[in-house]
Amino acid sequence: MPSAGGAATPPGDVVVRLEHVVLSFGGGPVLDDVSLQVRRGETKVLLGESGAGKSVLMKLVLGLLRPDRGRVWVFDQEVSAMKEQALYDLRRKIGMTFQESALFDSLSVRDNVAYRLEEDGVLTPEVMDERVRTCLSFVNLDAVMDKMPAELSGGMRHRVSIARALATSPEIMLYDSPTGGLDPETATTIMDLIIKLRDCNHVTALLATHRLQDGYLLATHAWDDATQTARWAAEGARHTSFLLLRQGRAIFDGSAAELRRDPDPYVREFLS
Amino acid sequence: MADRTLGAPPPDSALSQALKQWLFSFQEFWLLTAQAFRNIAATPFYAADTFLQMDSIGVGSLPIVVLTGFFTGAVMALQLSATLTEYGQIDRLGQLVSLSLVLELGPVLSALMIGARNASGMASELGSMVVTEQIDAMRALGTDPVKKLVTPRLIATIVMTFFLTLIADMCGIVGGWVYAVMGIHMNGALYWFSAFRILDASSMIQGLIKPLIFGGIIATVGCYYGMKARGGTQGVGRATTQAVVLASLLIIISDFLLSRLLVGILGT
C-alpha cells in the first residue's frame, strides 16, 4: 500500500493527519487502525462501500466523534484530545457538507447560509446579505434565497449546504457523499462546484463517496475560468489522491494511477 | 465453579448491562442539566431564541392551562359542596378550593399539562434535528447545541411554568366560584373571602416554588430525550413517549418530596 499515513512529509505541510485510529460503536470496529494524511491544497477521496467508515472518518476529523485509540490532528492541533469548547474555534476553519445536506429546516436558505455569520455577529445585515448572495451565486442558486429547505430539490439542498460551508471561507472542506442519491446531471453539477472550489479557492478537501467516477472526475478535471466548466486536464496535476476503505480498514492509499495498477483483488473488484 | 482465564473479565449479565446503561444515562442526564444551567451565565446569550420559546411554551400552553385550572376548581367545588353542606361548613368551600389549588393541584396539574405538551415537543423537535444531522451540522458550524437549543428552552420553561401555574390557580378559584354561585347558589362574596383568607405566605411560597422545579424537570427531560434520540423516525417517536412518561413521573414524585421538604421548612 503506497504512502499510507507515513511521516515523511514535514508536519507544517500536512493539515489533516490520522494516526492508527480505531473506533467502535458497541459491535466490531467501524474504523480499524486507519492512518492517513492530507497535505495543504490536496483533495483526498475516501472510497468505499456503504458502511465502510467514510462518514465516521469525516466526523473524526471535525471532532464530532472521538477515536477509541489513535490520534487525529488538524492544523497541528490534536483534535482527538481537545475539549468540545476548544473545538468550536477550530471548526470555524473547516466546512462540512453532510450526506443528507443537514440544512436547518426551520430557517430559510438565506438564514442557513448566513448562520455562522449571524452567530459571529460581526457583520452588518447588508454585508451579510452580500456575502450570502456571493456564496449562493458560487453554487448558481441566487434565486432561492428566500425559500425554505423543504421547497428545494435534493441537488439544490446539497448546493445550499456547500454555500453554507463556504460562508466563512474555510481552509478545509469535508464533503460527505455530496452526490449520493442524485441524478447524473445534478451529480456532475455538484462535482463541478467542488472542482471549482478546489482550483479557484485552493481549499484542502476530503470527499467521501462510493462513486468511483466522482473520484476520477476530481483527478482528471480542472476548472476552466474561460468556459466556466470543469475540463479534462493532465492526470496528477490536480493534487488528488485516494484512500479505499473496506470494513473500516484502509486497504489502499495513493494516486489515481496507483489505484488503477493496484493488484489487490478487492481493489480490482471495486474498480470493475 | 467455571474456569476463568486470568485477567479476562467475566461476561456481563443482562442485568449488569442494563444497570450500566441506566447509570450511563443517569450520568448523561445530569451532565446535560449541569451544562444547560451553567450556560445561563455564559455568552453568547440567545435572547431571541429564549423569547421565541417563551412564546411557544407560554402562549401555546395558555388555553390548556386555563381550561384545566377552571374545570379542576369547578369539579372540586361540585364534589366538596355536598359533604360541606352535610356538616354545615359550606362557608369553607372557598378556602378548601383555593388551598388545594395553590398547594397541590394548580402546580401539579399545570406541570403535567405543560409537560405533556412541551416535553414531547422538545423531544420530537430536537430528536428530529439529531437524526437528520442538524445537531452535527450546528456543532460543525461552531455552535454549542446545548447553549443554542437546550438553555433557552430551560429558561423559557421555568419562567412560563411559573406564570402559567399562577394563571391556573386563579382560573381554578374562579371555576370554583362559578359553580358555587350558579350550582349551589352560594354567596359569591363569602366564597372569595374564604378563598383568600386561608392563603398565607407559607402556602403561597410552597405553591410558587414547585412550578420552578417542575419547569426545570420538563425542559431537562424533554431536551435530554431529544438529544439522545437515535434510529430515525421510530427513535424520535420512542424518545417523545419516554420524555412525557418520565417527566410526568418525576413531577408527581418530586411533588411529594418537595411538599415534605417545604412543610418541614415552612410549617403547615
Image (tube, coloured by chain):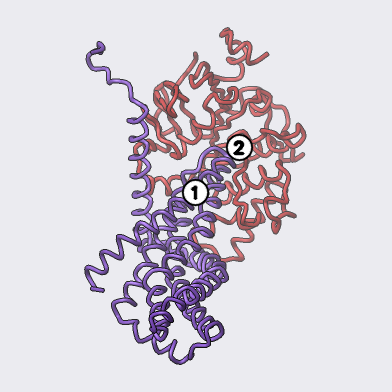
- Residue B139 in view here: yes
| Residue type, label 2 | Gln
Residue shown at the point (47%, 57%) measured from the top left:
B148
Q: Which chain is purple?
A: B
Q: Which chain letter matches label 1? A: B
Q: Nearer the viewer, residue A226 or B177?
A: B177
> Which chain is the one coloured red?
A
Q: Chain of mark 2?
A: A
Q: Is residue B128 above or below residue B150?
A: above
Q: Which mark is residue A99?
A: 2
In the rendered image, residues at marks 2 and 1 fall on the same chain: no
Which SS class for mark 2?
loop
Residue A92 visible: no
A131 relative to B180 in the view: left or right: right
- Place residue B151 in its image quadrant: bottom left
The answer to which of B37 and A234 lies nearer the viewer is B37
Which kind of residue does numbered mark 1 sit on?
Gly
Q: Position of residue B19 (x, y in %)?
A: 33, 35
- Which residue is the site of mark 1? B226
